[in-house]
Image: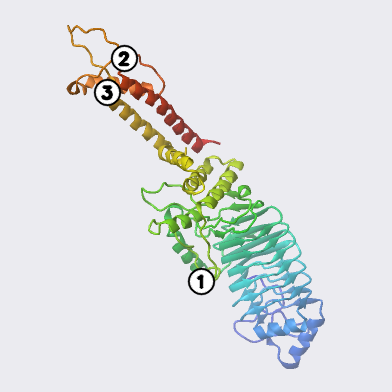
Amino acid sequence: MIAVSWSICQEPVKPACTGVQIPGLSRCLAHLRGPRLVDALQAIRKADTVDLRGTAFTADLLSQVLTHRGLRLNEANFDGARFEEKASFEGVEFTGETWFRGARFAGDAVFDEARFAGGVWFDRARFAGRASFVAARFEAPGGLGPLAADSLVLDEAVFAQPMIIEAEAGVVSCVRTRFEDGVALRVRFAVVRLEQVRFGAASSLAGSSTFAVGYSAISDIADENQRQNWTRWAARIHARDLRSGPEGWQPALASLSGTDVSELVLTDIDLRWCHFAGALRLEKLRIEGRSPFAQPPPGLRWTNRQVIFDEHLWRARRDEDSGWQAGHPFGDAFGPGWRVAAVGPERLAALYRGLRKSMEDNKNEAGSGDFYYGEMEARRHATVTPRGERVILRAYWLFSGYGQRASRALIALALLVLLVTAGLVGFGLPAEPQPGQVVAADTTARPPAPDQRVTWDRAETSARLALNAVVFRDAGQRLTTAGNWIVLLARLLGPVLLALAFLAIRARVKR
């Protein structure tokens, strides 16, 4: 609640009524009856300024006020007002400045198709249910919040001027919303939906641990029951992926479908369940702060990396028992008809390509590696990729994780050295003449008898030759024909594997 700075109602009730006194009377509007109420409503109709601070409204009393005003309010002050039932301001024109600071809405509040021509303030307003601003129009610069609501619905709303929106909520929905001059959207707890949104200027969606009101930082606008419900819900969602669970207050983004994100910055947003398919100009999106992506299922089968939720849907569709998520964890948060559709590997590759380019353009090349991995994975599985290219991609994946896993290249290099060593021991080194043995000149080197091939001396020589071969060094050792081919193969494959390992390390530390 906000501090009471007005003359309060003198109705003898407990707790004391905080409604502002109607001019010339000692009671607030809620405690007037009969002719006095009629006279007060008539005075409100004629007044340029409507002052109803601290007043307790029923749905009927609010309807009477708006009916007498012809759904048009000039300067209206509802600071600290309490709306004990559903509050409907649908279609109301607020032609001047409007205050709802510290207001309490016990049920849903409907501002659908309302028009706010002047500044509007909802600082510390609390909605126990749904705060709906569907198709509302905000024509003046300013702020909406910080407020608390079970759900904040801004679908099809138009914000003609720069706007700051701050909310503690379970759900924030922006579908076909237009922020003509940009918006700073700061959120706690909420699952956010940004679909077909127009950002006309630089905009941001950020998780916020606190909100600033005046010179104070506040973190608790919602009541305890609301926060507990949101925290329990978040805990159930986060329990699906404990390896990267965000802070309890950190909001999650559910969808960017149909939204041009070239003007958008995401900061401290949980992106593990974000549906990126359909987002426009994804390469221009900026992602900052702690904004975790999803992870593959645990186990040795899958490489540990950042993945987007669209890959979960695609892989789950291919193999239901693979452990990938087959459906959106937020379920019916936006209504029973809301679903996200899986995309194929061709579109998935384009999504990863856009995110990779976004990271690279923002000088986060080290962070783009996982998105490059995802892009290559999608290309490898895409039916439009030529067969020969898929073979190359499979080898690229197997030996170096698409140039992102140095350990694979180094393991492959170690296996190559072992195989070359074994090949040289068995077939590559010629037989050594016995002391005192006379050997006729023979230009063809041949391996020794099978029972004389495996010796420590031959193994040591073979290992040295194998190590020299992978770095193009010539040890000057006489070899059999098979040995020459084995060394040639090592000289071809060894440097390639070394280069892949170097590139993978560089990809992780490149600035």
Q: Nearer the viewer, mark 2 or mark 1?
A: 2
Q: CA distance from mark 2 to mark 1?
A: 83 Å
Circle 2 is placed at which residue position?
478
Q: Does residue 27 appear in the picture of this structure?
A: no
* Front one among 45 and 501: 501
Q: Earlier in the sequence, mark 3 or mark 2?
A: 3
Q: Does residue 365 appear in the picture of this structure?
A: yes
Circle 3 is placed at which residue position?
427
Q: Is residue 385 above or below residue 123?
A: above
Which element is circle 1 on? helix
Q: How is the image coloured?
A: rainbow
Q: Is residue 110 above or below residue 198?
A: below
* Residue 30, image x, y percentages: 68, 85
- At label 2, the amino acid type is Arg
* Residue 62, image x, y percentages: 69, 82
Q: Earlier in the sequence, mark 1 or mark 3?
A: 1
Tags 1 and 3 touching, CB below 8 Å: no
Task: Please tell me how crowded label 1 is: few (under 14), some (14-19), or many (20+) other residues with Cα within 10 Å.
Answer: few
Task: Please tell me how crowded label 2 is: few (under 14), some (14-19), or many (20+) other residues with Cα within 10 Å.
Answer: few
Snapshot quadrant of residue 152: bottom right
Which element is circle 3 on? helix
Q: Is residue 420 above or below residue 215?
A: above
In-image side of 284 versus 232 (left or right): right
- At label 3, the amino acid type is Phe
Q: CA distance from mark 1 to mark 3?
A: 77 Å
Q: Nearer the viewer, mark 1 or mark 3?
A: 3
Task: Please tell me how crowded label 3 is: few (under 14), some (14-19), or many (20+) other residues with Cα within 10 Å.
Answer: many
Residue drawn at 56 percent across, 50 percent down: 351
Identify the disc placed on residue 225: 1
